[in-house]
């Protein structure tokens, strides 16, 4: 009897009740709804590693108890333990960060596969430089220039917002990124260095912190980051003589939108989304001065922007016509064309361009934008993609 009053015994009994109760509740629910008992699907086929993993995923997705309790468990972890799960790191002062991107930043250089001694360019599908140089050369054969625009990870520019241990750091360089940039320079690929530009902006002449270049709740850049990048790209294009200033005049109009950041949505908890106030973002919509209309891409444009969600944000979603393409057009005084593939900066965007050959007609420059973390985490790696 005394043993039953022991807290350890109580915890053990509670644990066993949960362990046995969850599958029992799930089985009774499936029988009541006249469904097949999913636990018995294990015996429908010969056991293989792939089959067992698939079976485990199906059980997890169908778990009614898990579906009911998971959002509240996540909220408890978020509110009490400051734990954002497998995708989100909760930083300082209301800032959130993408955990895989943060892991990319702190990991050491990846082991590289040896390549050609003459070119120094590796040829594996996981190698960004090989794919980029190959694409540059394919475009050059058609008389089209390539300008590369890697966008820094948010955590690379704001490590001091991740943790107090970063102190007053204004930038953290990922070893893998430094290696890739050095090899791109050796291969004479034209790269816009937003890393140095954003570092300089953060420091400022007076050392005073300026408007953030990234959103606090989101993985993406802020309107200030968009405008800074567009200005730098336009300046580089004109310095190289790859683009000339046009005659179309644009003006801007301030528009505020409220955004629940993608990092908050990644937590997949309505309770968290209700608890965290949406971020107010003041954007600069680009308007064609002579017509008074919002900016639109031009089918006859000589510049094509091939990008991911950093090109899409503010441009194709609220408030519209306030994204990178619009501000680049404003800086160049003529429209550009854009092709956006969310999350596909490494390979999927080029595959989509191959499926739309008309997008290359009349182009003289391709600006290839991708986020830094795609160097190591890009969907489908860095495949070599033939032009249409």
Image: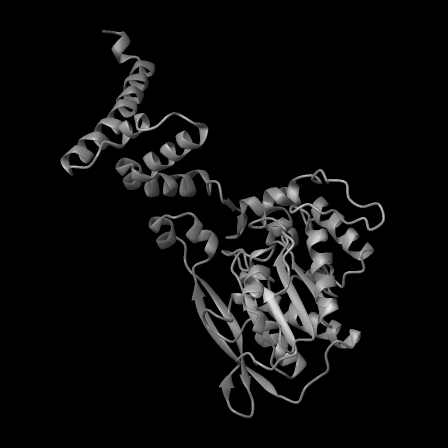
Residue at the image position 59 percent from the left and 45 percent from the top: 102
Rendering coords of residue 173 (x, y %) = 71, 49
Q: Is residue 170 visible?
A: no
Rendering coords of residue 387 (x, y %) = 64, 64
Residue at the image position 47 percent from the left and 52 percent from the top: 263
Q: Nearer the viewer, residue 373 or 283?
A: 373
Residue at the image position 58 percent from the left and 70 percent from the top: 357
Q: Nearer the viewer, residue 50 or 158?
A: 50
Q: Which residue is most to the right?
A: 118
Q: Is residue 140 visible?
A: yes
Above or below, 10 relative to 298: above
Residue at the image position 27 percent from the left and 41 percent from the top: 68
In the displayed structure, does residue 108 sit left or right of residue 69? right
Rendering coords of residue 124 (x, y %) = 68, 45
Q: Nearer the viewer, residue 144 or 386?
A: 386
- Colouring rule applied to residues: one colour
Image quadrant occupied by the C terminus: bottom right
Q: Tell me the quarter of the picture where residue 57 sits.
A: top left
Q: Tell me the quarter of the picture where residue 65 sits.
A: top left
Rendering coords of residue 235 (x, y %) = 73, 74
Image quadrant occupied by the N terminus: top left
Figure disc tally: 0
Above or below, 202 relative to 289: above
């Amino acid at each position: 009897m005394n043993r039953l009053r022991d807290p350890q015994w109580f915890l053990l009994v509670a644990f066993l009740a949960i362990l046995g109760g969850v599958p029992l509740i799930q089985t009774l629910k499936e029988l009541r709804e006249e469904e097949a008992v999913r636990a018995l699907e294990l015996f429908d086929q010969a056991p293989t590693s792939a089959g067992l993993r698939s079976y485990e995923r199906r059980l997890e997705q169908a778990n009614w108890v898990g579906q009911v309790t998971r959002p509240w468990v996540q909220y408890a972890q978020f509110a009490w333990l400051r734990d954002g799960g497998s995708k989100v790191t909760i930083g300082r002062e209301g800032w959130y960060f993408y955990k895989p991107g943060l892991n990319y930043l702190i990991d050491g250089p990846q082991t590289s596969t040896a390549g050609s001694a003459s070119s120094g360019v590796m040829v594996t599908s996981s190698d960004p430089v090989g794919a980029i140089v190959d694409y540059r050369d394919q475009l050059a054969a058609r008389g089209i220039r390539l300008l590369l625009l890697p966008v820094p990870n948010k955590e690379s520019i704001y490590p001091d917002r991740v943790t107090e241990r970063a102190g007053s750091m204004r930038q953290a360089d990922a070893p893998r990124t430094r290696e890739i940039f050095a090899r791109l320079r050796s291969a004479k690929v034209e790269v816009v260095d937003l890393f140095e530009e954003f570092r300089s902006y953060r420091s400022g002449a007076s050392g005073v912190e300026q408007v953030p270049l990234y959103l606090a709740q989101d993985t993406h850049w802020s309107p200030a980051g968009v405008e800074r990048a567009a200005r730098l790209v336009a300046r580089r294009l004109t310095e190289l003589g790859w683009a000339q200033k046009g005659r179309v005049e644009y003006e801007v109009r301030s528009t505020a939108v409220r955004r629940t950041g993608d990092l908050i949505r990644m937590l997949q908890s309505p309770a968290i989304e209700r608890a965290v106030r949406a971020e107010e973002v003041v954007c600069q919509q680009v308007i064609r001065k002579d017509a008074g209309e919002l900016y639109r891409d031009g089918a006859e444009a000589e510049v094509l922007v091939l990008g991911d969600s950093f090109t899409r944000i503010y441009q194709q979603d609220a408030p519209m016509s306030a994204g990178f393409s619009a501000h680049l057009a404003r800086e160049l005084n003529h429209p550009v064309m854009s092709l956006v593939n969310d999350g596909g900066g490494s390979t999927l965007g080029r595959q989509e361009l191959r499926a739309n050959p008309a997008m290359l007609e009349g182009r003289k420059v391709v600006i290839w934008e991708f986020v830094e973390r795609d160097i190591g985490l890009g969907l489908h790696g860095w495949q070599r993609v033939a032009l249409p």
